[in-house]
Amino acid sequence: MTRTHLLAIPVLFCLAVSASLAGGALPIGATIPMQDVTMKNVDGEELNLKSIVKPAGTLVVFTCNHCPFAKQWESRIVELGNTYEAKGIGVIAINANDPKEYEEDSFSVMQQRAKEKGMEFPYVVDATSNVARAFGATKTPEAFLFDKNMKLVYHGAIDDNGKDPSKIENAYLKLALEAVLSGEPVPVPETKSIGCTIKFRS
């Protein structure tokens, strides 16, 4: 293997987990798409995005069960979701992955994880991956936060340290949630979503 090939390896890895800012993601200011599409929740009920919207705002997080990045942030996503839903922000987690790619992304495992982690908000299946496509989501995890007018005010990462919560310097999503609650502008509207690629259903 040549030196050029060796140098290319870390570059390719970075590209695999790089930002989803390029290529089709919802622009800041966009309205929640696909609001009427029904998705199956882990409790067996069918719901849509319109049904989880709350007066203060709405948080949509694309995630899954198998991805190591999603696992790193999973507890923080649950904590933020539970905390801010109780404060009046609608919260939903969406799994758009094809379970044929990873069995761990199956509905039964989603149910187990939701129970184990104590999710107090819906965790649903995007059965066609079309909701994820409409958002322009490409990574797990990837957050989209909308304000009281259902306009996108934050898109990107949960925070800046998936591996070690004690070393977080920028709690992007938490700061955005606080801004939405207070009616203030979000300090950093868009960040890089670091994670596994969504395994879209064909």
Image (tube, rainbow, N blue to C red):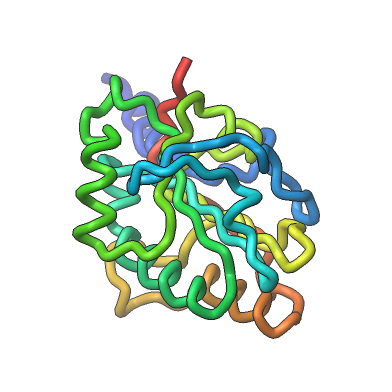
Query: Residue 140, image x and y in percent?
Result: 42, 45
User: Which residue corresponds to the image point at 34% horizontal and 77% vertical from the top-left?
Assistant: 167
The part of the image, by quadrant, that contains residue 55 is bottom right
**What residue is at 64 percent from the left and 40 percent from the top?**
135
Q: Is residue 105 above or below residue 119?
A: above
Q: Residue at x 68, y 75 (%)?
A: 180
Q: In the figure, 17 relative to 52: above or below?
A: above
Label count reads: 0
Asked whether residue 11 appears in the rendered view, the answer is: no
Q: Position of residue 150 (x, y in %)?
A: 74, 58
| In the image, farthest residue toward the top | 202
Work out which quarter of the rendered image holds the N terminus and state it. top left
Q: Residue 3, how many percent across, how many down?
A: 33, 28
- Depth check, front residue: 21 or 7: 21
Residue at 39% across, 75% down: 168
Residue 96 on image: x %, y %: 45, 34
Give the farthest residue toward the front: 45
Does 51 sit above or below residue 103?
Answer: below
Q: Is residue 185 visible?
A: yes
